Amino acid sequence: MTKITLTGQLVQYLFTGVTVGSIYAMVAVGFNIIYNVTDIINFAQGEFVMLGGLIMVFFTVTAKLPLPLAFVLTIAAVTGVGALMERFTIHPLKNASVLTMIIVTIAVSILFKGIAMFIWGKDPYIFPPFSGSKPLFIYGAAIQTQTLWVLFMTAVMVVLMTIFFKKTRYGKAMLACADNPEAARLVGIKVNTMVLISFALSAAIGAVAGAVMTPISLMEYDRGALLALKGFGAAVLGGLGSFYGAVVAGVLLGIIESMCAGLVSSGYKDAVALILLLLVLYVRPSGLFGNVEASKIKEF
Amino acid sequence: MPAKPTKLTQLAKLCVFSNVDMRSSNRKALFGLTLFLILFPLVAMNVSAIGHYVDIMIFVGIYCLINMGLSLLMGYAGQISLGHAAFFGLGAYTSGILCTKFSMSPWLAMIAGVGLTALVAYIVGVPSLKLKGHYLAMATLGFGVIVQIFFNEEVSLTGGPSGFSDIPGLSILGFSLDNDLSYYVLVWSLVLLTLIFSLNIIHSRIGRALRSLHDSQVAADAMGVETSRYKVMIFVLSAVYASIAGSLYTHYVGFLSPSSFDLFLSIKLVMMVVVGGMHNIWGALLGTWLLTFLGNEWLHVFHGFDILVYGAILLAVVMFLPDGLVHLVPRMSRVWKRG
């Protein structure tokens, strides 16, 4: 038996933290995309992740489809759910108050949770990791290969989003809506379509997060709320609306949480992220990385 | 020459029914509610099929206490809280712990619970209520989850996830409350008192200040209304309501565990207020009554997808009936009068 060294343990915690943090980062980016275009915080963001995980289970375990196909179908399905949500709940309530918008997205999240519980019941589900369950050993720490998939997918998402928002017409149009919807409308951008795309896109990212995390941490119907809360923590920490801020803050939050769980107390690990969220909200609502001016301009 | 009104007499005035000014509709509704509350146990206890409705009505009363505060906060002051289960839990746990571990008198423990909850609400409320909209919602949500984690983790104090039992019941002047009916009378008397108090607040200077806040904080500020003070005040008041409800819950149920005060309860409380109609305190009562009976009794038919039904109801009300079910009442009475 190999001796468990302190470095080994720390490397282990670090990897766990970065993995969990990448998930928070994806949730946070999902929040930011919708927030940037609509000024809405979508409380159902965590539910997209939950649906992503469970639908992936359905395609791989129940329908026995090959992994890449199941992955693509899962993203397509959840993207569709996101688009439906926008068309049937957000779109009809265009001029509602903030309080109403909060309650609508909460209602949708309860509805999704209820649908998931109706279909899958209360048990947690899992499907086999993408490339086998044999761990790698780095500095005495056992690393699941799925961890690398999580990191890879986060990186892919960051690159794709950057290209989308910097290079494509739709991406630029969405940024224009974020900056000034009236002006965007005047130059012929269909703001309604952009809002629809923002929901679809952020649902797609949620689906990716759910699909890659399920082999590591399982998935059940009521996981969404806490994921959303921590993802929101990451989004605020990184400066709401900031894309890179969200990724850095998400990973940071994951590492802090995992170090706390390993070295201090595992019971309070969930509380750490939330206390951090409250402190940031109270002391510096513009986030650690964004400054007040930048958070007004809302740039990715 | 009449004496200058002190803070205490002002407070006392808020508790008196004859001061329930107001449009006769409020008085009528109050009489109607009282009459219903008196008749209800007489009917329920003689019809065996609905005998246990008295038990459910006690829970309705307990949740009504919380939701009247939430209605003041959301409907009148325009601030959201997704963490009220935490205040409910703080009251409940303070009562439970002080009564079982320190054998304190339940009423003293209830007051201690109110004190502690008010303090926590003040400490959390001052920075939180500077936030707006989504930020406030998330901050209160986060606070609620932190408190629940605390209940789960402080095993020596709270019994951890499995909770603790054998909490003594209440007694008044030597009479111990040992059946459902006695708790029914206690809980609903408190609900009626709180309702009168709240209605008086709505029609007082504070109530006007709150409504001005709801419409436009900037305008209210400009007119010299101390908005931040009133917001915190009403937040603390609503936490106090929740704490009292928590103490009553503890003594009635006799058992506590963290799962009774989780995030979903916070959301369900907001749901009750919204479904009933958040701009009207009567709506909070209606929504609480409806959703509690749905959850405890009528949704058993839908076993396994009750959450789905909850979500659908909430969504339908917000989308198609944004003022809540209570808004249907004047509409129906107009139709009735037209014949």
Image (cartoon, rainbow, N blue to C red):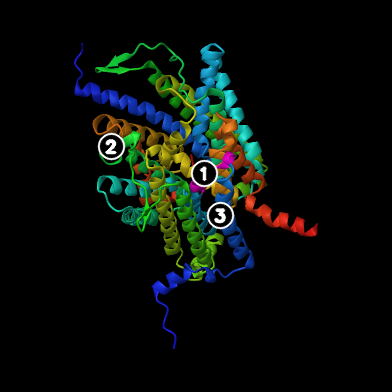
State the residue position of label 2.
B155
Residue A230 drawn above or below residue A11 = below
State the residue position of label 1.
B56
Q: Is residue B51 magenta?
A: yes
Q: Measured from the top left, where is residue B257 in percent x and y?
A: 37, 38
Q: Is residue A170 left or right of residue A222?
A: right
Within 10 angstroms of label 1, few (less than 14), some, or many (20 or more) residues?
Answer: some
Q: Is residue B215 magenta?
A: no
State the residue position of label 3.
B37
Q: Is residue B100 left or right of residue A27?
A: left
Q: Is residue A99 left or right of residue B177?
A: right
Q: Measured from the top left, where is residue A261 in percent x and y?
A: 29, 31
Name the amino acid type tagged 2.
Val
- The chain to which mark 2 is attached is B
Real-space Cα separation, disc 2 to disc 1, in angstroms: 30 Å
Name the amino acid type tagged 1.
Ile
Residue under disc 3 on the same chain as residue under disc 1: yes
Q: Earlier in the sequence, mark 3 or mark 1?
A: 3
Q: Earlier in the sequence, mark 3 or mark 2?
A: 3
Residue furthest out toward the right: B339
Instruction: State whether residue B42 appears in this view.
Output: yes
Instruction: Write down the region rendered in magenta.
Output: B48-60
Name the amino acid type tagged 3.
Leu
Instruction: State whether residue A285 appears in this view.
Output: no
User: Which residue is at 54% across, 11% downward?
Assistant: A64
Element carrying mark 2: helix
User: Which residue is at 39% across, 72% downward?
Assistant: B8
Within 10 angstroms of label 2, few (less than 14), some, or many (20 or more) residues?
Answer: some
User: Which residue is at 27% across, 29% downward?
Assistant: A262
Element carrying mark 1: helix
